[in-house]
Amino acid sequence: MQARLVALLLRYDERGFGRMIGARTRQASEQDTLALRRYRDLGAVFVLRDDLFEDILPRIVRRLSFESPRAMVIEEPPARGRVDWGRTIDAAWAERPGETPLLLHTRQQRRTFATPENLLAVLTLLEYQAEVQRLLWDEQITAGSAALQHPLNEISERCDRELAFPQFAGIRGTAQQILTGEDGDPETLEHQVRERLIPGSNSAYEDLLAWRARLHAVRLLRRSPADPDDVLGANPDRDNYLYQIWIFYELADLLRARACLDHIDPRQGQMHIRFRWGEGDDARGYELRHDQGVPIPPARWGAEPLRRHAVPGVRPDFYLWRVSPAAMRVEHHGKLFWREPGVVWDAKYYRERETSAAPSSPVKRMIADLTLLGERHGTLLFAFLAGGATTTSQGRSYRLRPADRDQSIVPDQQVAVQPLCPDTDLHAVQTTLTALLNVAHARLREPRIPRCQGVFLDTLSVAERGALLGRDGEILAPDLVCPKPHIGPWRVDLVNRDAHCCRDGRLCHIISQPGSAPPVRPPRNARELLAELERLFEAGDLDTLDEEAVERVMSRIEALTRRFVEITGALKDLRRYEAKLGDIGLDRTLHLLGATERESLALAIYLRDQLDEVGANDYSASIIHVARVLERELQRRILAVPGVSGADFPHGKPTLGTLGGVYRRNPALWGTITAHLSQVWVSRVDPDDSTFAVSVEQLIMEVEQLVRVRNEAAHTTPIPRDRFRTILRALCDGGPLRVGALNVLLTAWPLS
């Protein structure tokens, strides 16, 4: 585990390497196996780096070793050395007696830095750089282009800067020859330096010899009786934390190798990984947090009476949750009622000895943590399990969950026990990690969107049962059950539609959704239909009613009335109501309508007759169906104009009031539409009067009148019977356009 941490920390968190890995005393050393040799070399290069660059080399440079040999030189004046006049005169007398000497015999003392000590310093830098380059080449094979950012590069550059020191640069060639064996060898040079060491001289060269020995001799730490020599490793008392860090960076390395890693933050207290997992459209974004509190826990415990810090906190070793798409939540007025759960992982490095069947203490702690957090799934990762059968990553995993029986605990809570032992076989480790991610992905990939699933109770059965108690002990008069499959198939609440639906976030989880509304009871007669319609109409200021709200109300009313027609059995017999459409003025154009539009108009007539039977004073539902037919026909014609698409309109498609808005506020788009209408518009629409013509502007005025009526129908404003009759006539056979707005649209604006 330490060996892998050496490589992983240097790859992702160099500062973390400095905090955790170092030279330690009174510890045992690992055997020098081939599998661990690369990690030992990598760790030694970094652990001993500062000793060389920040301590030994600066002291050598401050007190460089040098030699000053004396030599007799014959030179022309002026002399640079001390003149030996005796020899100079004797030589001149021998050649030219009585003449002035032209050459001087001088003694010179020159300083040289090509000493064995300095050669050893340069040789050490060259060897160190060569070792770094070798390790960097291995890293490039393993990590690819990511090796360009590896801190090994910084060490290599530091060696180049130190070798550029003038006194070192002058002897670099000689040191290179020693390194290659052309002029001696490093062992001989070390021997010469040891022989030349003088007590009280520069101790940096002595430290350099010791540093070279440590670079080649230091071993990885292991748990055993202590050795006298220094060893390389982390504090063994923090083995459980090191196990967590190892899992964190092995996961990061696996994700980077698969090009799934988006971001890694190695800072203590903020460690997290953001990554993608899954193929194609099934890919999702996740965040794995290490040793941090769960962000916005799905559940919350409290103390009564309120006491600070009374509820124990939970900081799981790992918490995995989906961030893209974001986790769904139920929040109302700043209060969180529910959030999509994640997955909890806890890592245990110590060897469990309680039982060979199940490590009970960690399982109990995991169940407690899941309960406090409101989470459902936890996994315990063990480096060792009792019994010896599961001491590798390939060991057998198993799951613990509540038995299938009546009980008060959450039935889908689950704890998995998974062996995950550090191993030199990276394939086995990565296979286990991949399986963990696949299991979490299967649980978290699909957003759990709260939807209204209300099922109404039979009123007679509820009345016979009497008062029931709610979750908080209050007396409850439920009229429906509310399943919540986004929490689990086991979660079903008894609720009261008036007291809880879209009012109480504890029991209604669609409360924060735009346009949410309580469920409607399927009506069995016209009176029940009227009662349910009252719940659907939009309240508030009619003038501020926007298109989205109107569309939402219209869709609900259409669905409710259609369900009413199905329950009463009239849906199978709507053809006789379609026949009545010819009686209201659509005999010439009925064949131009689609089947859906004819059915909507027939529903409007059927609803009118049903409401007549009970003496209703609001015919808004029939108006909604009539307005929808006109809207669909208008929409179909606008989108058929060449050069016009749904993207040209605010809601992605034209609505009933779109044409008037384009006419007044969008000259460019209106020009495109009028250019098309100039070719297809048929202004003579009255078969009994060939002189009567209708323009598109007149049609727009009539449509806008119907828009206002439609908005009133979607609002709590009632539409009485007489007004409904007038509107239906203006639409189908009368009004300012004589033949009705719908007939004008169908005949004057034909579809090609």
Image (tube, grey):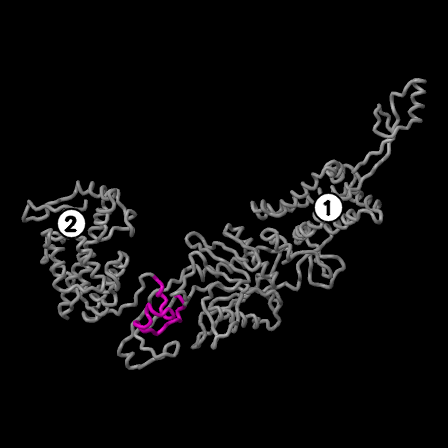
Number of marks present in the image shown = 2
Please give left or right for residue 523 compared with residue 732 in the image.
right
The residue wearing badge 1 is 58
Q: Position of residue 639 (x, y in %)?
A: 24, 47
Magenta stretch secondary structure, dominant: loop
Q: Which residues are magenta?
A: 486-513
> Picture quarter containing residue 572?
bottom left
Q: Is residue 452 above or below residue 179?
A: below
Q: Position of residue 717 (x, y in %)?
A: 20, 64
Q: Secondary structure at mark 2?
A: helix
Question: At x 63% / y 45%, what residue is drawn?
Answer: 154
The residue wearing badge 2 is 699
Q: Secondary structure at mark 1?
A: helix
Residue 317 visible in the snapshot: yes
Residue 49: say if magenta: no
Upstream in sequence: badge 2 or badge 1: 1
Question: At x 29% / y 52%, what residue is drawn?
Answer: 651
Pointers 2 and 1 in contact (CB under 8 A)? no
Q: Is residue 489 above or below residue 289?
A: below
Amino acid at circle 1:
Pro
> Looking at the image, is mark 2 or mark 1 nearer the viewer?
1
Please give left or right for residue 616 compared with residue 546 in the image.
left
Q: Position of residue 412 (x, y in %)?
A: 45, 69
Q: Residues within 10 Å of mark 1 (few under 14, many from 20)?
A: some
Please give left or right for residue 656 compared with residue 182 in the image.
left
Residue 388 vs residue 692, the one in the foreground: 692
Question: At x 93% / y 26%, what residue is drawn?
Answer: 86
Residue 684 vs residue 636, the one in the foreground: 684
Residue 504: say if magenta: yes
> Picture quarter containing residue 404?
bottom left
